[in-house]
Structures are given as C-alpha cells and as structure tokens.
Image (cartoon, rainbow, N blue to C red):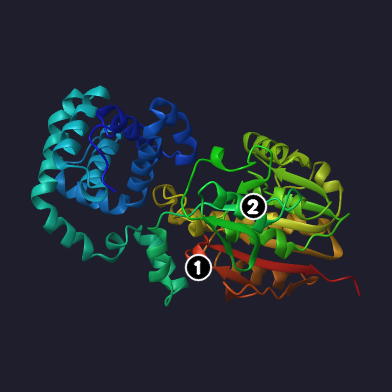
Amino acid sequence: MRWTARSLGAELRAVAARGVAGVLRGASLSTVLPAMLPRVEPRDRTLLQEMSYGVCRQAVRLEFWLERLLSRPLKAKEYEVHALLLCGLYQLEYMRVPAHAAIAETVEAARLLKRAWAVGLVNGVLRSFQRRRDDLMAEADAIDAVRHACPGWLLNRLRKAWPTRADGVLDAWMQRPPLTLRVNRRQGDVDAYRQQLEAIGLGAENVPDVADALTLSRAVPVERLPGFDQGRVSVQDAGAQLAARLLDVRAGQRVLDVCAAPGGKSGHLLEIADIELCALDNDATRLARVGENLERLRLSARLELADAAEPGGDWYRSDYERILVDAPCSATGVIRRHADIKLLRRNSDIEKLVELQYRILTNVWPRLNAGGTLLYATCSLLPEENADQMIRFIAEQPDAEALPLKVDAAVPAGPGIQILPGTRDMDGFFYALLRKRPAA
C-alpha cells in the first residue's frame, strides 16, 4: 500500500513516535495505543496502527540499520528521537511513502516533539539510509536473526524447539493477522451470521476444527459487525477458540477459569453450556474487562480478584469439575498479533514464567474433583512452558494423567498438542488435557 503525504503528516509521525517510545520504555502497544488514537483524525488511525505495529514487527532490522547510520549512540533517555528515527526508516523501506515526504515530515515531527536539536540528525540519518540502502540490506540479510527481524535469543530457542518448522513460524510472525470472529451460538448459528456478513459486503470463511469461528476476508472496525454490541459475536483468534471445546464443559458443572482476563475464553465457556463459572485474575483492571465482556454477551460469572499461584480466597474454598489454566507465558505464539513482544520479552523471562506456571498448576490441582479435567493452555511455542512443563507436572502428581487431544491442525507436543502460527491462519497455542484419577 502507498500512503499519501497528506495522510502521513508530521503530526501523525510525532504521535506514532510517542507510541513507539512508550514501547521502548517497556509498555505494551495495547496499553499505549488507546491513548494515542484519539490524538489523530479517525481516518488516520489505521495508518497510526500500521506504523506502530510495523516498527515493532521490523524492529530488529530497523535497529541494525540505525546503529550503522548513527555516528554515535543516542542518549538512553532520548526515547522519542530514537522512536522517530525508527518510524522514519520504516516509512522509507516498508510503507513506500514518497521519500521526500517521509524525510520532510519526519524532520518536522522532531520539531513537534520539541527536539529541535535532532532536526539535523533525523534528516541526515534518513538521507544516509537512502544512499546506503543496498549495502545495509545486504548486511542485514547476511545475519539470520536480522534477516528474520527476530531477537537472537528467541531465534535460537525457536530453531532448537522446531528445527524443521522454524522458518514457517518466522514467516508467519511477519504477517498481519486476520480478524476472526466467534459466533455466540446462544444467539444464532454460524452459517446464518456468515450470510448476514455477506449481505453487507463482508466475506467470511469457516475455520476447520473450530465450529464457532469465522475469519473475515478483511479487517473492519467492530462497530461494523452486525449485533456486536448485543453480544452476537466476539473477536477471538480461532486457535484460542479451541480451548472451550477441548475442556468439554457440561451443564451444571462448576468451572474455574484461571488467569481469565480479558475474558474471551470465559465468554465462550458460558456460550457453550449453563455452567457455574468462577473467573479468576490477579489484576483488577483486567478483571473488570472480563465483566465488561460478559455484560456485552449478556452472560454472567463470579469474578474474583486473586493470585492463582497462592492458596486462599473464596475460589480456593470450592472444588470444580473443570479447570482452565490459561497460563501466563512468553506469548511467542501470538507475535504476529502483538509484534511488540519482540521488544518487550527477554530471554531471562522464560525461566521465571516456567516457575510461575508450575506454581499455578500445583496450587489449583487440589481444587479439581476426582474424575475432573484440567486444560492447560498457553500461547507459547517454547517446550519449556509447554510439553516439558506437562511432563514435569505429571511426573510429580501421581493422580494426574494426560488425555489424548485430536485437532487436525495441531502437531503432537509431548502430552499435549501445538498449533503453530499461520496454520489455518491461526495464532500459536499449546493445549494439554489432564484428568485427576479417582483415589484407589
């Protein structure tokens, strides 16, 4: 796509730089962007998102070029200038903005950011990139991690975990994700909703293995989706929709959804059956989102603010026939949807996440009734968080056994299954289903 100079003015570039600077400081785009979007015209919000997500998606390459274009490193505190330079490089290489407009308006954005000292720097770096582009591209492509715009530590882990499939995952990470819907079967069936979409000019396709999913041919604002405000559909990746079906809830069962925010899986469980659901999360703001999402769906659950890794609370005084542990993880399976993970995640995070996951599992397991099942789910691709975690847990819990799961789109992964990113246009998810054996 070729953006116009009018729609990519200096103001938009300055806002984009502020958003990317927030990520460089350690915030997620999902936190930063909602505050940024009102600062630009509605017609330009898609462009702001494209630039923000695009810079994060290509950050490893952009940083590689920037390091070679700067005569000396920027001061650590100059996040906005750093981000503006990344935005300028992204425009020149990936948005195909006319070069004169990209440079002139990015330079002007430096003034809007009150960084007059950086005007010459921005101009010089971007013009130098124009002159040196071919050499810089060749240098970048000669290094595996830079060629794939992937942090080196993550690339090493990925190739070790999936030696024959890593290139496919790397390609998927660079794609823009589709908009996939989950149809609320309490309010209608999937085929009828697809026909309603087609009647307003929106093409949609069913997703094999995922009964309630429709993937749109193009993304649109949720306001354009018929009945969205009334809970007829939700936005949820098809891979994430597998969780509720794999847990196989039945009417009347007591069900615990651990780490439930923002509530997509909670909603799906309630759409499937009349259950007594307790949705648990340790973040009050995110737990409130669960309530908001369920209210839109016209469904209800008991919401509890608590740490699933620690005993205590009302939830811990109950027992359950079904438990969903949607564990905190590296989120390496959803990088195409959350490109800022490439900037925010660190190699040192993995060990900490693995231990947190294990603490949650060992804490909730006593609350599962004998004969009941627990579905362990992550959006990670790393075996340390997935298959290895399950092997360890089963070995240390004599009453735990893995049950087979069959999803045609998945590949076996120890006691569970792995959906790899891009398979049937899904994000990456791991699932393992554990049953608690009755006492002998």
Q: Secondary structure at mark 1?
A: helix
Please tell me whether residue 259 is drawn above or below residue 114 in the rendered image.
below
Q: Is residue 357 visible?
A: yes
Mark 1 highlights which residue?
Answer: 423
Decide which of tag 1 and tag 2 comes sooner along the chain. 2
Please tell me whether residue 125 is drawn above or below residue 333 in the rendered image.
above
Image x and y of residue 380, in percent: 53, 60
Amino acid marked by disc 1 = Thr
Image x and y of residue 156, in percent: 39, 67
Image x and y of residue 229, in percent: 65, 37
- In the image, 111 versus 234, the foreground residue is 234
Q: Which mark is residue 307?
A: none
From mark 1 to mark 2, how far is it between C-alphas? Answer: 24 Å
Q: How many marks?
A: 2
Select label 1 or label 2 by which is in front. 2
How busy is the neighbourhood of tag 1: few (under 14 within 10 Å), some, or many (20 plus)? some
What quarter of the picture does the C terminus occupy?
Answer: bottom right
Image x and y of residue 75, in percent: 24, 35
- In the image, 236 versus 207, the foreground residue is 207
Amino acid marked by disc 2 = Tyr
Taking the view exactly as shown, the residue that stands out farthest to the right is: 440
Quarter occupied by residue 364:
bottom right
Please tell me whether residue 140 is drawn above or below residue 315 in the rendered image.
below
Quarter occupied by residue 21:
top left
Mark 2 highlights which residue?
Answer: 193
Q: Is residue 328 left or right of residue 41?
A: right
Q: Is residue 364 left or right of residue 6?
A: right
Taking the view exactly as shown, the residue that stands out farthest to the left is: 131
Q: Residue at x 41, y 59 (%)?
A: 173
